[in-house]
Image (spheres, rainbow, N blue to C red):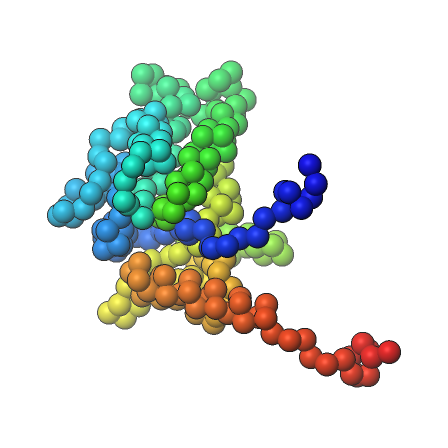
């Protein structure tokens, strides 16, 4: 097959994959509810929000996997899916790997022959089942919002410098994977009397924003504000791509 048959140009931006983390009660579930999204409820936290469509009673990984399959395959009009919360979902995957619901003495260290093999099995599920299902969902035009609780731990940056930062409270074995997978990692926090989303990495927060550099470091905590930040970032990307290069001059060393 020729290279020209393989190469495709994006004609539209794919729906965002967002990892949104913050303390309990700050409004993570409400964020999805305000966007008229569907919630897959792992901890029954959305039960306090009236009128929100949700799939509750997801107590095992196979149940959750079936729900994701339904969102990926069945006819529906939802444009946003909220996983509430992704850290509880990983707990369900750990229970599936270890069988700890049947035997509470089983752990990730002792499962599947010991020697920490449980973590490898869990990663196989994340890479082989969870992420492909999420990709199928975004491929049909549905944004995915993965809600997570927050923790505050030591973070090592690319230069090897360690600092204390707020970050998603996920198992260490999958934390880097989910940060890499997400298009946006946003920290929900109180700022004065407002609830904000931190979108850019800072000395105190782990964050990520894949949609260009528009100078927007945070936005209001709503789907509409986040969409506006994405549009501004996309416009900045387009402007940068279409900008004409400066004429060559002897000072730049480019002139012949």
The total of numbered circles placed on residues is 0
Residue 94 in view (yes/no): yes
Residue 119 in view (yes/no): no
**Horizontal and vertical percent for residue 248?**
76, 80
The one of 129 and 235 positioned closer to us in this rendering: 235
Q: Residue at coordinates 36% horizontally, 41% vertically from top-left?
A: 86
Residue at the extreme left: 50
**Horizontal and vertical percent for residue 148?**
35, 46
**Which quadrant of the rendered structure holds the N terminus?**
top right
**Horizontal and vertical percent for residue 58?**
26, 31
**Which quadrant of the rendered structure holds the C terminus?**
bottom right
Q: Residue at coordinates 23% horizontally, 51% vertically from top-left?
A: 36
Q: Residue at coordinates 17% horizontally, 42% vertically from top-left?
A: 47
Q: Residue at coordinates 41% horizontally, 21% vertically from top-left?
A: 98
The one of 123 and 56 positioned closer to us in this rendering: 56
The one of 99 and 208 positioned closer to us in this rendering: 208
Residue 255 sits above or below residue 50 on the image: below
């Amino acid at each position: 097959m020729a290279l020209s048959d393989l190469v495709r140009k994006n004609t539209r931006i794919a729906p965002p994959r967002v990892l949104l983390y913050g303390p309990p009660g700050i409004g993570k579930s409400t964020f999805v509810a305000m966007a008229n999204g569907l919630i897959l409820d792992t901890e029954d936290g959305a039960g306090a929000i009236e009128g929100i469509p949700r799939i509750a009673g997801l107590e095992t990984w196979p149940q959750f996997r079936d729900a994701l399959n339904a969102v990926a395959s069945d006819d529906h009009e939802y444009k946003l899916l909220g996983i509430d919360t992704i850290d509880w979902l990983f707990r369900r995957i750990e229970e599936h790997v270890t069988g700890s619901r049947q035997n509470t003495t089983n752990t990730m260290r002792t499962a599947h022959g010991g020697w920490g093999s449980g973590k490898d099995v869990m990663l196989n599920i994340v890479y082989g089942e969870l992420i492909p299902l999420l990709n199928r969902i975004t491929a049909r035009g549905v944004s995915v919002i993965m809600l997570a609780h927050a923790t505050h731990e030591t973070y090592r940056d690319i230069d090897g410098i360690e600092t204390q930062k707020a970050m998603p409270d996920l198992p260490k074995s999958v934390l880097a994977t989910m940060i890499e997978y997400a298009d946006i990692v946003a920290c929900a926090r109180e700022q004065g009397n407002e609830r904000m989303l931190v979108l850019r990495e800072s000395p105190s927060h782990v964050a990520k924003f894949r949609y260009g550099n528009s100078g927007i470091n945070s936005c209001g905590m709503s789907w509409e504000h986040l969409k506006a930040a994405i549009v501004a970032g996309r416009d900045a990307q387009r402007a940068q791509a279409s900008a004409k290069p400066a004429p060559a001059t002897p000072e730049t060393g480019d002139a012949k």
